[in-house]
Amino acid sequence: MKVGIVGYGVYIPRYRIKTEEIARVWGADSKNISNALLIHEKTVPAIDEDTATISVECARNAVQHAKINPKDIGAIYVGSESHPYAVKPTSTIVAAAVDAVPELTAADYEFACKAGTAAIQTTMGLVKSKMIRYGLAIGADTSQGKPGDVLEYTASAGGSAYIIGTENLIAEIHDTYSYTTDTPDFWRREGQEFPSHGARFTGQPAYFRHVIKAAKGIMNKNKLKPDDFDYVVFHQPNGKFPLKAAQIIGFEKKQITEGLVTPYIGNTYSGSTLLGLAKILDDANEGEMILAVSYGSGAGSDAFIIEVTKENEKRRNPKPLQRYIDRKEYVDYATYAKFKGKIKGVKLEKP
Amino acid sequence: MSEGLAIHWRLIPQRYNLVGTECLKCGEKFFPPRQLCPNCRRVGEIREVKFSGEGEIYSYTVIHTPPEGFEFMKPYAMGVIKLIEGPFLTAQLVDCKPEDLEIGKRVELVFRKIIADGSSGIIRYGYKFKLKD
């Protein structure tokens, strides 16, 4: 039985802040940072946006694209490291907002930046075993970087939702494979406002090891090599890491550029790989092969081999990512700090 | 406990999905939902209906002196939206500057945070509108 993507939806907030504006505040060399991280600007959520609102917007777009009855969704999993509540699921808010309630199962996932792809794997299992007809897997975040920390240049907001099923597929998922270890490269302890990271330790033993092992693992398992793929998309903590990983594995630059969105929207954490994949799917044609590999600190990578079907050409996504990327308004650091709740006492809440 | 917890919960279908009602006898649609058709009275036949979330700005105003809790959003616009199905409703207009607004401009539904009950209460989500792309 085939399993794959019936529809997908994306959402990124309208506001942007440029790398040079953040660098200006912290007295850093913006050209240096821009070149080192390959990042030009990032999305900024409005004061009334959070992971729940972003999840709902992309989930509604996915349901619209899939042209399904939301009551046929049997499971919703929302992957994020910035769920608005510590206890109280984001997934039930999404379930109500897409009108999938009440006959379904739902839960929130957390695995740093790969919780969204873990949600896809779970729903693949559920639809393939016929426990449910459709599953809705979402990766969304409003990520935080400590003011002045290198993460602040990239930590952004956005999300992507995928309807997983077995019929009317716009892309078939041929296989999935994961590579997981206990690697403490990036974390946030309970109650802490900002995450901490192991600086250079987040590279070689963390991101590169897992992404490369997962990519090579799934290709070996399926007897495929880099030139069997038209596109490759990796988790994008910055613009540089995925390019370097692609080069190490043996992909050409043209295979990775289509899905490389971080330089213009920042690192959307759980949304990152899935938004890159959506960007590819927006224009992909029948028979084209995609290798997608996520990465979540802590650490693990989920790899997917995806083949685009004729249905994707017949049923193009009505709200492609590029439209959201182009729709933007720049804010200065002070407005960004206000929107992100970085100023003490500034929140959209009753006292 | 957050005040009005049960009221918010009861209004979730309206606040998240613009669920209103319509009278099958005369065809009039209502938001917020009415349980009795004012035109047809006892012979009216009321049923639930979900509005599309498409509409236009019928009128709007810009808030410079917001109520408690909304201070950091100012200035923000509140619009009277005429839904394409007929009913009018009042909602905040987001992702725009006051000078972008004009009576008659097309708008669409978005899902946003309305307000949180302090730092430990519930977060209330609901409908707002933005200018149609």
Image (spheres, rainbow, N blue to C red):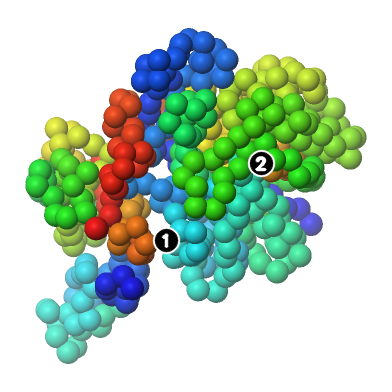
- Left or right: A340 in relation to A269: left
- In the displayed structure, A215 sits above or below A117; it is above
- Left or right: A34 in relation to A177: left
Name the residue: 64% across, 53% down.
Answer: A119
Q: Is residue A189 at all visible to an observer of this figure?
A: yes
Residue at the disc numbered 2: A296
Residues packed near mark 1 inside 10 Å, few (<14), some (14 to 19) or many (20 plus): many
- In the displayed structure, A309 sits above or below A205; it is below
Residue A46, position as x, y percentages in the image: 33, 41
Could you tell me the amino acid type at mark 2?
A: Gly
Labelled disc at residue A97: 1
Residues packed near mark 2 inside 10 Å, few (<14), some (14 to 19) or many (20 plus): many
The subunit letter for the residue under badge 2 reads A
User: Which sits in the foreground, A351 or B11?
Assistant: A351
- Left or right: B37 in relation to A346: left
- In the displayed structure, A169 sits above or below A46; it is below
What element does badge 1 sit on? helix
Q: Quadrant of the C terminus of chain A?
A: bottom left
The subunit letter for the residue under badge 1 reads A
Quarter holding residue A335: top left
Name the residue: 28% across, 46% down.
Answer: A345
Task: Answer whether labels 2 and 1 touch (C-beta < 8 Å).
Answer: no
Quarter holding residue A182: top right
Name the residue: 15% across, 40% down.
Answer: B75
Could you tell me the amino acid type at mark 1?
A: Ala
User: Which sits in the foreground, B119 or B72?
Assistant: B119
Q: Is residue A236 at all visible to an observer of this figure?
A: no
